[in-house]
Image (spheres, rainbow, N blue to C red):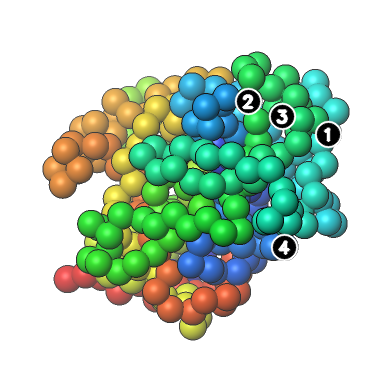
């Protein structure tokens, strides 16, 4: 029986992930200790998202849940503590942010936080937090008209991958004289053991307890899988190997790994590492 082998949230978009033993499924994505996946985002002076694509050292910014704060650390920096309590939506300073083509209202975190991230990344920037009154709808082109929302993710609330898919890619990398790479290069939220390589591509649904996840769109990969998440530096790039067998015609030849997914049943259900998953294939 397939099982859930890893759970990860990324509290700050494009920064390090937070590995969990269990989490709560919500329509906006995974949540733990009232922290949502990609609830925060680093932006430039125009409110546009900064990511590892241009600033790979963002991988070294590591968040940890410490009581009522999100503690953030980076090499050579004093730790930063970000209060988890939501600001007053009526009085807190705000800014308009941009994620791809979406304009999203966000809370503007304070000047001290902005200075910390500016020093950690090396460019002027600020930290934004998804606003309580904001709503960001996903494209229904891939959901067959089913409405869904997300926070600051690239496009969908959850990314699901299979362990066997990475094993398959690593076998090809090693055969080509390259180093195997870890799953964190692909930054999934949920990883499934016990299914065939890339079986997640053909799934109709993932049933986890009372919850049902629907995979809706293959995840196109940018250069981020070539960034070593432990060093924040560009390392061996798997995309040329992926070019030989992971190009998706329905996405104009984009190289894909993992399935963007939405929650269609089981809001607020808890999931845990080791839990059994029923995978229903679409054929």
The residue that disc 4 covers is 33
> Which mark sits nearer the N-terminus, 3 or 2?
3
Tags 3 and 2 in contact by the CB under 8 Å rule?
yes
The circle on residue 79 is 1
Closer to viewer: mark 1 or mark 3? 3
Q: Residue furthest left?
A: 249
Question: What residue would you read off at disc 3?
Answer: 114
Image coordinates for residue 59, horizontal then vertical, percent: 60, 31
Foreground residue among 109 and 156: 109
Instruction: Give the percent coordinates (x, y) of residue 196.
Output: 32, 59
The reply to whether callout 3 and callout 4 are in contact (CB within 8 Å) is: no
Q: Which residue is mark 2?
A: 125
Residue at 14% x, 43% y is 249
Instruction: Indicate whether 144 appears above or below 38.
Output: below
Is residue 108 among what the camera can see? yes
Where is residue 77, by image quadrant? top right
């Amino acid at each position: 029986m397939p099982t859930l082998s890893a759970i990860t949230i990324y509290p700050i978009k494009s920064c390090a992930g937070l590995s969990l033993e269990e989490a709560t499924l919500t329509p906006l994505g995974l949540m733990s200790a009232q922290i949502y996946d990609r609830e925060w985002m680093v932006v430039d002076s125009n409110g546009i998202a900064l990511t590892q694509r241009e600033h790979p050292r963002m991988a070294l910014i590591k968040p940890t849940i410490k009581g009522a704060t999100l503690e953030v650390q980076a090499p050579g920096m004093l730790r930063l503590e970000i209060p988890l309590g939501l600001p007053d939506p009526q009085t807190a300073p705000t800014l308009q942010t941009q994620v791809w083509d979406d304009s999203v209202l966000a809370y503007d975190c304070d000047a001290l936080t902005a200075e910390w991230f500016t020093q950690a990344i090396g460019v002027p920037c600020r930290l934004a937090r998804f606003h309580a009154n904001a709503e960001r709808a996903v494209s229904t082109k891939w959901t067959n008209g089913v409405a869904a929302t997300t926070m600051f993710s690239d496009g969908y609330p959850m990314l699901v991958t299979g362990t066997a898919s990475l094993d398959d890619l690593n076998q090809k990398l090693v055969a080509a004289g390259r180093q195997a790479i870890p799953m964190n290069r692909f930054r999934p939220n949920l990883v499934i053991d016990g299914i065939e390589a890339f079986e997640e591509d053909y799934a109709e649904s993932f049933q986890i307890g009372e919850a049902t996840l629907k995979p809706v769109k293959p995840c196109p990969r940018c250069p981020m899988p070539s960034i070593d998440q432990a060093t924040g530096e560009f390392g061996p790039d798997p995309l040329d190997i992926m070019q030989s067998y992971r190009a998706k015609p329905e996405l104009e030849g984009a190289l894909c790994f993992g399935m963007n997914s939405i929650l269609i049943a089981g809001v607020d259900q808890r999931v845990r590492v080791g839990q059994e998953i029923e995978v229903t294939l679409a054929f």
